[in-house]
Image (cartoon, coloured by chain):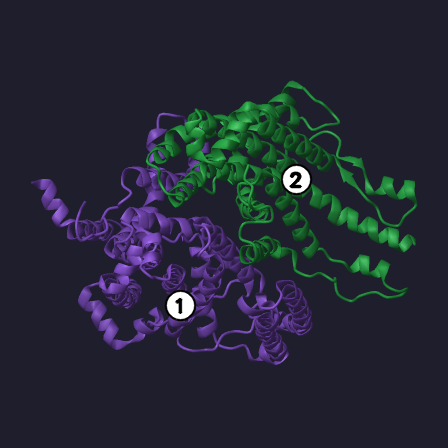
Amino acid sequence: MTDFINALVVLSNFILVPALTYGSQLALGALGVTLVYGVLRFSNFAHGEMMAFGTMITIFGTWGLQALGVSIAPLPTALLALPLGIVGAVALSLFLDKTVYKYHRQRKASPVIFLIVSIGLMFFIGGLVRFIIGPGDQIFFDGTRFIFSARDFKRSTGLDEGLALKMTQAVTIITAIIVVAAMFWFLNKTRTGKSMRAFSDNENLALLSGINPDRVVMITWILVGALATIAGTLYGLDKSFKPFSFMQLLLPIFAAAIVGGVGNPLGAIAGGYVIAFSEIAVTFAYKKVVTYLGPDSFQPDSLVQLLGTDYKIAVSFIILVIVLIVRPTGIFSGKTL
Amino acid sequence: MNQTFFNQYRTPILYSVMALLLVIVGVGQGWSVAFTILNLCLISAIMSLGVNMQWGYAGLFNVGVMGFAALGGLAAVLVSMPPVEEARAAGGQGVLVGLLILIATIFVSIVAWKQFGAKSKKTGYWMLFIIIAAGYALMRLFFLPSVEAIEGVNPSVTGYLGGLGLPIILSWPVGMLFAAGAAYVIGKVALGLRSDYLAIATLGISEIVLYFIKNEEWLTRGVKNVNGLPRPVPYEVDLQQAAWFQQLAADWGMELAEASSLFVKVCYAGLFIAVIAILMYLSETALKSPWGRMMRAIRDNEVAAAAMGKDVVKRHLTIFVIGSAVIGLAGAMLTTLDGQFTPVGYQPLRFTFLIWVMVIIGGSGNNWGAVLGGFFIWFFWIEAEPIGLWLVDTLTSFMEPTHWLRLHLMDSAAHMRLMTVGIVLLIALRYAPEGLIPERTARKH
């Protein structure tokens, strides 16, 4: 029996908790991609870099607060600086929409042109971020590291295996829940949210009923900027901030959005967790688990790993391919925004 | 009057400007530099021809140019490097058995799908899942020990299977085949769905190809690189010892070392020009043929073309495979020119998006434009760094040499490239979406 519980603890410690955290980050990212898709109707490749930009502003805010001696320990100071990052990302999004996207929107350019434009912006923002903060690693986490560590857990339960919960993991999951709840409340209950959904559902009909398209677009960019900053900051707190890694996040985020059905917020969240769980479960070495669950004195020689950790990115790709073959409209097809 | 003259002779004028730029570099920085730039311009031009086929003829957006180019580079290694006998003895059989199991798994899956999937999708999926899982487990059983054995053979020098030891020129068509195979699989999955799915799928495949090349050391030596690939042209050392070449160098009035390196570059340029001439002939002929008109008709109005009885998805698949094959060819040529295979060198900015800028600036849909774009953009990409540094230096010359802003700007010059590519792309899309040499249509307006 203890063997069984030990195995469960190993699984929770190395799969459940990390995947919930990573899944929340992906879900928030995919939510942003899906919003742009639903309202503006293109795949926004610049989203990853927008996350990096918002996070960068948050980092500057964090440093500023730290210099002033402001602290909300045990929580990380970055949470306090988050609004500043959001304002920065929203400002940049609105600025880029006005200077770049608006022109193509007025000419009713095809979605592919928007996609290429967003790639141009991806490089522009990427260059801007690297230019301002540099390409290196930035650690901006402070506050308490663990809510409870593996050693505490072992001591209080008497098990052989430990389960740790990092502060960043708890913060990520709780923030994600709050943000998602607020998001759904906004989309379903407020007048503005409803007008956004109407616009996404049928643009012409929405225009006929007097919805101001410019306002809808503006609100979309505000939401997208905020989501990008929150997702990026949570990811940066949990891992570390490195401009390069946000480009790498692009594929899992797109995969999450497509798995759930592009344009569908609920799907984006489900997709984020699907991708995160598969990625971590497939690349996890099950040696310890098998040792606990198998008969006594049985120990596998290999790591019992389905796929090397280097191929993490392949997992999101394979899921993407399977979804495209089996159900190209995603799991929650048929309903957008 | 001037305007019409320029428009009428746009192509020759712009090509002359490009030639003039290369000559200026030749006189100013030396002919060796000029030919190095020219060779890379030629390869870039071939890549941009490939992208132009996909984007310009058919409107397909491929974000995975890098992956297809890397597959071409892989072909160069696998075809030309001498085989490592020890490694083959150590693990060749196991790898072979593993590959056979892989092929058998795919074959059995297809048969099983046709048998069961047609009747009930659910049974079909379960059958597929079981077959693939079993095949994968069985394959790893044979694969992993052999891979370890191969990588253990003299790891600092070899540690991989080596190639076939054939002339490297043969790798060019092989590179086309590799890229075409990958493109076929991706095209089968992603074409016929929404247009951005192809973009995301190609982005994924190119990342995976790169991870594969970096990690599968038994095949590619991974990040340890493969150096000293054989050449299709003579080596400098041999040239310097040949009597006829010493005579030639004396006639030119050049140093022997300088002359030999220049000669090698000219040989490469000759080869590349031959390839580009053949490609240009074929693609121009294809574009003017009924097939080319059909492709453009599909691009301009898919619904109308489908209504006329054209199979849009199949035609898209064809052109996607052909375009990717051309990119694979360029990738193999690039690795041949470099003489080494460095997986870390494949960066999306340089291998995917720069090529995109070439096509868009050059003129999508026009082969001459795509080639010119390849030349222009590569030229400025190479010369941008000295120009950028000079610019920063001049602009900040009034500051103290150790001023923080000046130092920061000097350090960040490299990131400016990223930004510049983005801005150039945005400006081109907005102000000159037709490019330098716009597509020719039978009638304007």
Where residue A150 sits: x, y (%)? 82, 43
Most foreground residue, A154 or B296: B296
Question: Eyeballing the image, is B413 above or below B93?
Answer: above
The residue that disc 1 covers is B176
Q: Are marks 1 and 2 on the same chain?
A: no
How far, Cα to Cα, is label 1 from label 2? 41 Å
- Quarter of the rendering occupied by the N terminus of chain B: top left
The residue that disc 2 covers is A24
Where residue B403 sits: x, y (%)? 45, 27
* Residue type highlighted by circle 1: Met
Q: Chain of mark 2?
A: A
Which residue shows up at 86% across the image and 51% down it?
Answer: A6
Q: Colour of chain B?
A: purple
Most foreground residue, A115 or A290: A115
From the rendered image, report the letter of the chain displayed in green: A
Q: Determine if residue B402 is in view.
A: no
Most foreground residue, B49 or A183: A183
Where residue A103 sits: x, y (%)? 34, 33
